[in-house]
Amino acid sequence: MQTAMNATLKYCPQCAQPLALAAHGGTQRLACTDAKCGFVFWDNPVPVVAAIVEHNGQVILARNALWPPGMFALITGFLEKDDPDPASGVLREVEEELGLQARVASFVGHYPFERMNQLIIAYHVIAEGEVVLGEELAEYKHVPFEQIRPWPAGTGYAVRDWLLRQGIQPLPFDRRFLSRIRNFRVIDERLLTAGQPTAEEFTALHACGVDTVINLALNDSDHALADERAVVTRLGMQYIHIPVVWQAPQREDFVQFSAAMKQARASQKTVLAHCAANKRVSVFVMLDRVLNLGLPRAIAERDLQAIWQPDPVWAEFIRAQLDEPSQP
Ligand SMILES: [Zn+2]
């Protein structure tokens, strides 16, 4: 699914005619509508070099200036045309971004990062000298090997493999910095819920492995983003909007939500479901887990009660979906 990348190219770079989907090489690809031109947008993955930088016996993690506070990662950069080979490219990146001279200690592996249409080529490098941050980075930190918590995406898999080779069992994937999102809650490995995230927080969610965003808020709900669909799809995530009116939730809303969750489970997507304050979502998630996954209500309700006590409108909505008789 590289729709976000494809969406950036509308016209043929050779002859400026519009591009359209056509069968090439066994799948649908954007191709020039002028048969004489013959341009096909193959959309091949882009090689990215990544460095696990060992410095004074610890690993350096850095925060990109565009990322939210608390979000740190490996040093990465695009392989450049003039790099003699990927190992030279990764050393160039370490020097540009940290001001450090480094040498390659080992090749860790290559990892597909499908969401970004990248191929990550990861190295363990050992660096010396004083850190001087490049302009792309906001801050850095030294982390002891055994305290690194890799991300469940992209470079996180390289970190995990490298830690295992150092004889260290990696800690669970790191989602700590998501906890500052309004009313954020982890339901299970593949389902996160929250109130309205900011654009920066969507970037962090994406980096943590979220593939699909389901929004139950209205476009004019509290804290709504001006164009959430654009923000989310630009990052390469799928966006599903099911606007649920706060004062009048409908069975049809829940039917749509159930279908979206079923689809996500079948395709093993990691979902963020959010609304304005995680109230609508906490009810829908509880109902989905009881009605569609067969979870006991008492267990499914814990995550709901951690967020709020449903008001009379929502208590009645829950009763109606669970097919309970109304209270006299
Ligand atoms: Zn063309």
Image (cartoon, rainbow, N blue to C red):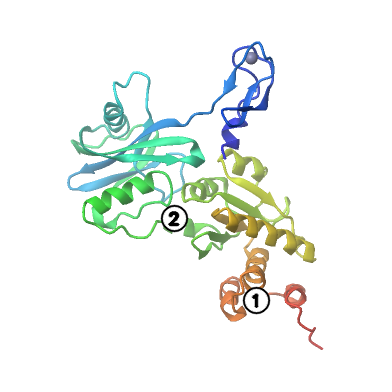
- Looking at the rendering, the quadrant in which ligand 1 lies is top right
Task: Give the answer, above or below, for where 34 lies relative to 154.
Answer: above
Asked whether mark 2 lies closer than 8 Å to ligand 1, one says: no
Q: Quadrant of residue 128?
A: top left
The secondary element bearing badge 2 is classed as helix
Q: Quadrant of residue 48?
A: top left
Q: Position of residue 203 (x, y in %)?
A: 51, 45
| Label tally | 2
Picture quarter with the C terminus: bottom right
Which residue appears at 43% of the width and 48% of the height?
153
Q: Quadrant of residue 217?
A: bottom right
Say few, some or many: other residues with alpha carbon within 10 Å of mark 2 (under 14 / 14 to 19 / 20 or more). Answer: some
Picture quarter with the N terminus: top right
Q: Position of residue 186 (x, y in %)?
A: 51, 64
Which residue appears at 62% of the width and 63% of the height?
278
Q: Amino acid at mark 2?
A: Phe
Q: Give the residue at mark 2.
A: 177
Q: Nearer the viewer, residue 214 or 99?
A: 214
Earlier-in-chain disc, 1 versus 2: 2
Left or right of 64 on screen, residue 246 = right
Left or right of 87 on screen, residue 217 = right
Q: Position of residue 259 (x, y in %)?
A: 69, 59
Q: Position of residue 242 (x, y in %)?
A: 72, 55
Left or right of 140 on screen, residue 45 = right
Say few, some or many: other residues with alpha carbon within 10 Å of mark 1 (under 14 / 14 to 19 / 20 or more). Answer: few
The secondary element bearing badge 1 is classed as loop
Asked whether mark 1 lies closer than 8 Å to ligand 1, one says: no
Which residue appears at 75% of the width and 59% of the height?
244
Q: Give the residue at mark 1.
A: 309
